Amino acid sequence: MENVYVGKAGPDAAADRGWLLGHFKPEGDPRHSADVEIKWGVHPKGERRARWARGETRTALLVLISGRFRMEFPDGDVVLAERGDYVVWQRGVDHSWEAEEEGTVVITVRWPSVPGYAVPQE
């Protein structure tokens, strides 16, 4: 089918640091978008963001699928502990995160899709 992509979140996400859709996918790929980014994040217990995201120019939604996930904000932390718990933060909100249980799975949606935000892998 033309202009249709069918995949599996696990393997597709593993190929691009968790990201399934966004500006970083090739032009012409149905997953290419300058409007939105979507991530299927699978995290081992204790995994943390490499460094705080600062000067954010996007709005984001993070939904817990399984496990336990802590979002850290300058004004305090939010713990997502039950399937379906979610948090939304607006542009300009600095943040970081930590997976608190083995095999934690979250879906992140950010908009718009802006180049230049990848944290270098260590």
Image (cartoon, rainbow, N blue to C red):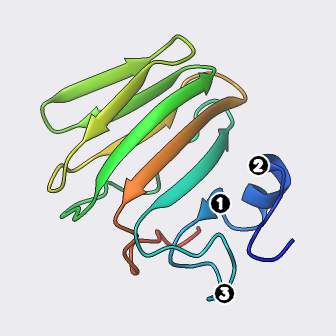
Q: Amino acid at mark 3?
A: Gly
Instruction: Give the residue at mark 3.
Output: 28
Q: Element at badge 1? A: strand
Q: Which label was assigned to residue 109?
A: none
Residue 50, position as x, y percentages in the image: 46, 56
Mark 3 → mark 2, Cα distance in angstroms: 20 Å
Q: Residues within 10 Å of mark 2 (few under 14, many from 20)?
A: some
Mark 1 → mark 2, Cα distance in angstroms: 7 Å
Q: Toward which corner of the image does residue 78 lie, by quadrant?
A: top left
Q: Element at badge 3? A: loop
Q: How many marks?
A: 3
Q: Quadrant of the N terminus?
A: bottom right
User: Is residue 48 among the parts visible in the rendering?
Assistant: no
Instruction: Give the residue at mark 2.
Output: 9
Upstream in the sequence, badge 1 or badge 2? Answer: 2
Q: Which label was assigned to residue 20?
A: 1
Q: Amino acid at mark 1?
A: Leu
Front: mark 3 or 2:
3
Residue 20, position as x, y percentages in the image: 65, 60
User: Above or below — where is 101 with respect to 32?
Assistant: above
Say left or right for 99 vs 59. right
Q: Toward which corner of the image does residue 14 lie, by quadrant?
A: bottom right
Q: Residues within 10 Å of mark 3 (few under 14, many from 20)?
A: few
Say left or right for 76 vs 45. left
Upstream in the sequence, badge 3 or badge 2? Answer: 2
x 67%, y 73%: residue: 30
Residue 35, position as x, y percentages in the image: 40, 68
Upstream in the sequence, badge 3 or badge 1? Answer: 1
